Amino acid sequence: MLSLFDAEESRFKGVIEAVKECAASLGNKVIAAWIYGSVARGEDRAQSDLDVLLIAHEEEVASVQSWSVDFLLAKGEALLFSPSVNTLSLADIRRLMQNNDPMWQAIVNDALVLNGLRPTSIFQATLDKKVPT
């Protein structure tokens, strides 16, 4: 039984590393990378997808989304996970936050930060000019 848990822990580390590798491969196009949802809460099941949110500069959103989906689908086949990737701009996140959107609340409550700032810190950083908009 212990080897089953060890195998799952190793697979989960591989999944996390795949998302980190994805964000790192995109360089400064990605402002932040977060995992949220059931996996972040530790409530995932075998059929659960992996909710990944990438924050990108407005002009890079489409290319980041396309590239990251292809990258993570390939990694998902090897590591047996199903990625659900969303790429949003800071303006998109600002709208979610201002509207107190349920998705934003889930992200704030659940997010595992893999790259960049926490969801609650990202806007102060933009105001302080620590993150270019």
Image (spheres, rainbow, N blue to C red):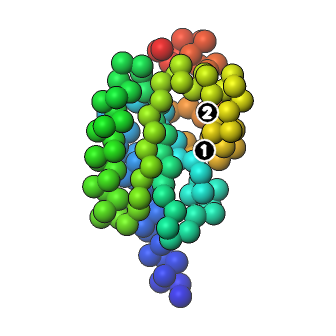
The local secondary structure at tag 1 comes to loop
The answer to whether residue 60 shows anywhere in this view is yes
Which three-letter amino acid code belongs to the residue tagged 1? Ala
**Residue at mark 1 to residue at mark 2: CA–CA distance:** 8 Å
Q: Residues within 10 Å of mark 2 (few under 14, many from 20)?
A: many
Q: Position of residue 60 (x, y in %)?
A: 35, 24
Label 1: few (<14), some (14–19) or many (≥20) C-alpha neighbours in 10 Å? many
| Above or below 99: residue 1 | below
Task: Give me the residue at 44% from left, 68% from top.
Answer: 10
**Whole-percent x, y for residue 123 in the image:** 61, 21
Say which label, 1 or 2, has the lower sequence index. 1
Residue contact at pointers 1 and 2, CB within 8 angstroms: yes
* Residue 43 to residue 101: above or below: below
* Whether residue 25 is visible: no
Amino acid at dot 2:
Pro
Q: Is residue 55 left or right of residue 21?
A: right
Residue highlighted by disc 1? 111
Identify the residue shown where x is 56% and y is 16%. Answer: 126
Callout 2: SS: loop
Above or below for 28 versus 82: above
Q: Quadrant of residue 43?
A: bottom right
Q: Residue 89 location in percent, x, y?
A: 48, 24
Q: Is residue 64 left or right of residue 52?
A: left
Circle 2 residue: 119
Nearer to the camera, 8 or 108: 108
Give the residue at x 69% y 25%: 99
